[in-house]
Image: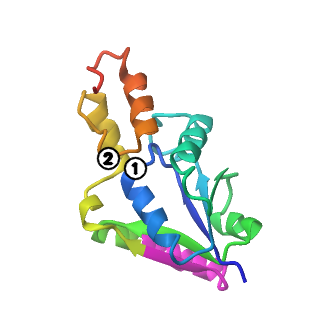
């Protein structure tokens, strides 16, 4: 029986921490469906279509990964739609744990047959967040070691004409 996990997030931008979580989950799951969503409570760096393209390109070397658009609605419904047996999440710290625990509990109430699998961040990515990447890049900082090369190039291009100094 094929084991599929759904990894949903805004991935704005996808970081090496996300890729580390996906690579580690690929050991456990036959397929990982990465669902790119829009977080309306945050200012987006890239629009939805750009993020899907960037994420798909960054993950092209993972044959068991499929990138799709999160269609909205409950993540548990999307998990059912793609045939997932689990929701994949990564946590960096206690704050993430409390948030993810609440979401996992609500998902379990709504879908008792769906498991949430939480992977702890690798030590070298515990501080890393998409929000931090955006802030550092906006002020001209170098984030090239923290994101895939194609995403770094898109970030550099995004800030090239801004009032802020573009990263190199």
Identify the residue under disc 2.
146
Q: Which residues are magenta?
A: 100-118
**Residue nearest the viewer, comparing 150 with 112:** 150
Give the quadrant of residue 147.
top left
Residue 90 pos. (x, y %): 42, 67
Q: Quadrant of the N terminus?
A: bottom right
**Is residue 114 a member of the stretch shown in magenta?**
yes
Sort mark 2 into few (<14), some (14-19) or many (20+) by Cα contacts within 10 Å: some
Identify the residue under disc 1.
15
Asked whether the residues under the numbered discs 1 and 2 touch, taking CB atoms below 8 Å apart as contact, a structural biologist would say yes
**Residue nearest the viewer, comparing 101 with 83:** 83
Residue 110 lies, with reference to residue 147, above or below; the image says: below
State how far apart marks 1 and 2 are (Cα).
6 Å
**Is residue 73 a member of the stretch shown in magenta?**
no
Q: Confirm whether residue 43 shows in the render.
A: no
Q: Which mark is residue 134?
A: none
Q: Earlier in the sequence, mark 1 or mark 2?
A: 1
Residue 130 pos. (x, y %): 38, 47
Residue 32 lies, with reference to residue 10, above or below; the image says: below
């Amino acid at each position: 029986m094929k084991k599929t996990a759904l990894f949903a997030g805004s991935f704005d931008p996808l970081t090496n921490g996300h890729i580390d979580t996906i690579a580690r989950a690929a050991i456990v799951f036959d397929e990982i469906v990465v669902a790119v969503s829009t977080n309306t409570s945050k200012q987006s760096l890239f629009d939805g279509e750009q993020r899907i393209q960037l994420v798909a390109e960054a993950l092209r070397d993972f044959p068991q990964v499929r990138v799709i658009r999160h269609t909205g609605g409950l993540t548990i419904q999307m998990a059912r739609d793609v045939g997932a047996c689990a929701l994949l999440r990564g946590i960096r710290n206690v704050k993430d744990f409390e948030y993810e625990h609440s979401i996992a509990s609500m998902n379990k109430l709504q879908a008792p047959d769906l498991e949430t699998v939480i992977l702890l961040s690798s030590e070298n990515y515990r501080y890393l967040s998409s929000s931090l990447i955006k802030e550092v890049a906006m002020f001209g900082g170098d984030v090239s070691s923290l994101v895939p090369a194609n995403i770094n190039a898109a970030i550099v291009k995004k800030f090239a004409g801004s009032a802020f100094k573009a990263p190199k």
